Amino acid sequence: MLSAMKKIFEKTSCKIFTNTVMTQKNFNELQEIVDLVKNFQPEIIQFAMMHTKNLKNLRTTLKDSAIKIRSLKINREILKTDGLPFCSMYGFEECVGESYWPEVLDVYNGASKIFSNFSQLENGMRWRAGFCKNCLMDELCAGIWIEHKDEFLKLKIHPIC
């Protein structure tokens, strides 16, 4: 991966965007990942919540992930998250990736089928609590990955007012 980024950085004018899925296996290496990637002047370094039911033991928690992201030594202008709602990123709201990426996507599913105007929330991949409509970030927030719903409810997070 690093050799490919080096070639892109040195030989093209392409912008570099990275997305690292946080897992139990790489969780303590996130700062090291930032330190490796930032040498290539990326536009975005994003850290994403894992969202799969099958590998639950590999997933990180919303709470631990938000704390870890806040601890990273990185320019906030290039730091983005995926799957961490604004209400869990107090003080780092500008890092919530859902405010950067489009809400509706064109998705290619690998079976030669393209879905235009695909909404993860409307298709049941993400979830939002009823109180989310009272949040200042309501129109920007895409919710959380559905796999983290029970954890979110246990955290007793409140909307940003």
Image (cartoon, rainbow, N blue to C red):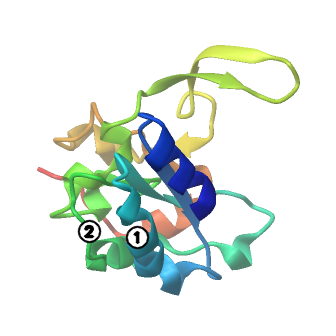
Amino acid type, label 1: Val
Q: In which quarter of the image is residue 119?
A: top right
Amino acid type, label 2: Ile
Residue sitting at x 55%, y 65%? 150
Q: Which of 78 and 49 is in front in this view?
A: 78
Residue sitting at x 26%, y 76%? 73
Task: Provide the residue designation for mark 2.
Answer: 74
135 horizontally vs 141: left or right: left
Outermost bottom residue? 28
**Which mark is drawn over residue 18?**
none
136 horizontally vs 3: left or right: left
- Give the image location of residue 55, x and y in percent: 77, 69
Q: Earlier in the sequence, mark 1 or mark 2?
A: 1
User: Quick one: SS at disc 1?
Assistant: helix
Outermost right residue? 111
- CB-based contact (under 8 Å), mark 1 and mark 2: yes
User: Where 111 falls versus 84 (above or below)?
Assistant: above
Asked whether the viewer can see residue 154, the reply is: no
User: Quick one: SS at disc 2?
Assistant: loop
Mark 1: give few (<14), some (14-19) or many (20+) Cα within 10 Å. some
- Give the image location of residue 61, x and y in percent: 51, 74
- Give the image location of residue 141, x and y in percent: 34, 40
User: Where 78 falls versus 156 (above or below)?
Assistant: above
**In the rendered view of the protein, which quadrant contains the N terminus?**
bottom right
Q: Nearer the viewer, residue 48 or 63?
A: 48
Residue sitting at x 66%, y 24%? 107
Task: Provide the residue designation for mark 1.
Answer: 34
- Give the image location of residue 77, x and y in percent: 21, 52
